[in-house]
Amino acid sequence: MTSQVSRRWRPRSLLQLVLLAFLVVMLPIAVLMFQAGQALSELSYLADISARQAVEQTRRARALSNLALEMERSARQYAVVEQPGLMEIYASKLEEYTALLEAQDRLLPDNPDIAALTEQIQTLEALPTMTAEEISENLDAFVSFGEHTSAVREATNRYIDNRIEGISAQAEEVQHRLWLQTAALVSASLALMLLFTWLIIRPIRQIERRILTLGSGREPAASYLIQGPAELVNLGERLDWLSVRLNELEAQKQQFLRHMSHELKTPLASIREGTGLLSDGIVGQLTPRQLEIVELIDTSGLELQRLIEQLLDYNLLQHNQTADSECFNVAALIQEVLNKHQLALDKKGMQVSISRQPIEWMADRDRTARVLDNLISNAIAYGEDAGRLEVRARHHGPTLIIEVANSGEPIDSADRERLFEAFYQGRARRKGPIKGSGIGLSVAADCARAQQGQLALVDDDELAVCFRLTLPWNGDGILDNDKQAQHSMLKLDSDARNRQV
């Protein structure tokens, strides 16, 4: 059942999470687009208003200059011709000038030129009531009037220029603000993208780790819940179910192997006991032909027992990977393993050569013996009749090297990559009545790995097949093998005198 705790903070499906991620990531970009549009609209409106006002103010300033010239012209003409209509024109232009000046005063408050013009207008308003001679005497007032009018026009132009500069500064400020907003909102979008990417990737990685754990055969230290969309949570629950099911199948397999081994060894022990009684002549003397058949049955039973023991070894090694290190003599161990196969070697007619140099080494003796037993057994089974078998041992500092090589047919290159896989049997055919199980080399490789060592097929200059076992020193310190060899030399020489190998 999907945990309710895992659903508090997440959508119920992967599609909802992706859509939510898209909407949330796009939200800062949409805000940025809206703010940019608002800023551009504001600048566009401000520029339009400023342009209109600038045109209007420029026209008003120009109109003031034109009206001042027309007023001066009408006054001078009246002073010459004294035509009443000219003063009417003058009064009309003065009234229009006064209205424009008031509007300009609102644009440029506290302007000294406008204040001077306002005072002069009071004087100029009295001209229509004066005689021609009085008007002629006051015509000089139009000189300063025109100068102040020109000054007002220049002040208006400066005001418009300042207004344009202000708009430019405001545009730069808006641009700067938009850049900051863009950086902030784009950063927020990237952060949201990373967040939602993590929310999507995290359960996938959890599932990946769970699958790798299942594939490696190791159970996690504690069960953990996949957190994420419902589809991935359900997938994690299916993986938990699969893990439980695999454990059940593994337990059934182990139980089957134990029962099968027990059921096979019980009748096999009776068969071997019977062949032993027949060989000893308990039930009567056997003819040579009968004795040969009994020995064949006993040999086949021994081979079958060895296959069963290999199967049990493989089963044990799958669940016990700890090594029990002890110091032992490598040469003595090699001789001990060879003694177990002496009858098979004699029957095969193989010439055996072993390393007689005593080497004291710290490792798992039982597992090392099991590796040698499987390699020598393979050499007997697949090696050449009346061929050669060599077992070499040497050490380089903290590393022990043992090589088991035999003559015969080389191992096919297609079989080399899968040579140490359990239950894999290559193209080479086993010599003898019993077919191999295909787990001997797998058991040997597992024994080597349990000691942090390695078993590998290597090329040899003299013999066709050569397996090399490499073991590290699994103790606190390295012993001086030259000094430790003396106490085991007597035993090794005694064994060599008793049996010529």
Image (spheres, rainbow, N blue to C red):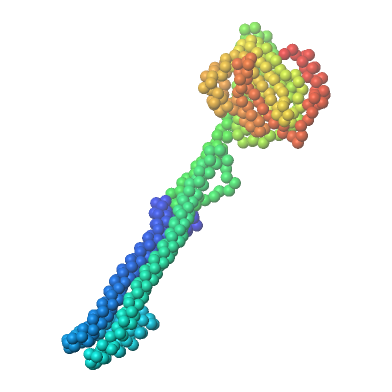
**Residue that protrudes farthest toward the top in the picture:** 288
Residue beneath the point at 82% across and 19% down: 490
Q: Quadrant location of the C terminus? A: top right
Please provide percent x and percent y for residue 403. Answer: 66, 22
Foreground residue, 246 or 52? 52
Q: Nearer the viewer, residue 378 or 56?
A: 56
Do we see residue 92 in this rendering? Answer: no
Quarter-of-image position of residue 423: top right
Number of residue marks: 0
Is residue 452 visible in this depiction of the protein? yes
Q: Nearer the viewer, residue 324 or 308?
A: 324
**In the rendered image, the vertical position of residue 371 relative to residue 345, given as above or below:** below
Compared to 443, does 285 lie above or below?
above
Q: Is residue 478 left or right of residue 390?
A: right
Residue 398 placement (x, y as % from top left): 72, 30
Which residue appears at 38% of the width and 81% of the height?
111
Residue 402 in which image quadrant: top right
Return the x and y of residue 481 as percentages of the image width and height: 78, 26
- Tell me what residue is drawn at x 54 percent, y 50 percent: 224
Figure quadrant of residue 381: top right
Looking at the image, residue 37 sits to the left or right of residue 384; the answer is left
Of 369 and 261, which appears nearest the observer? 369
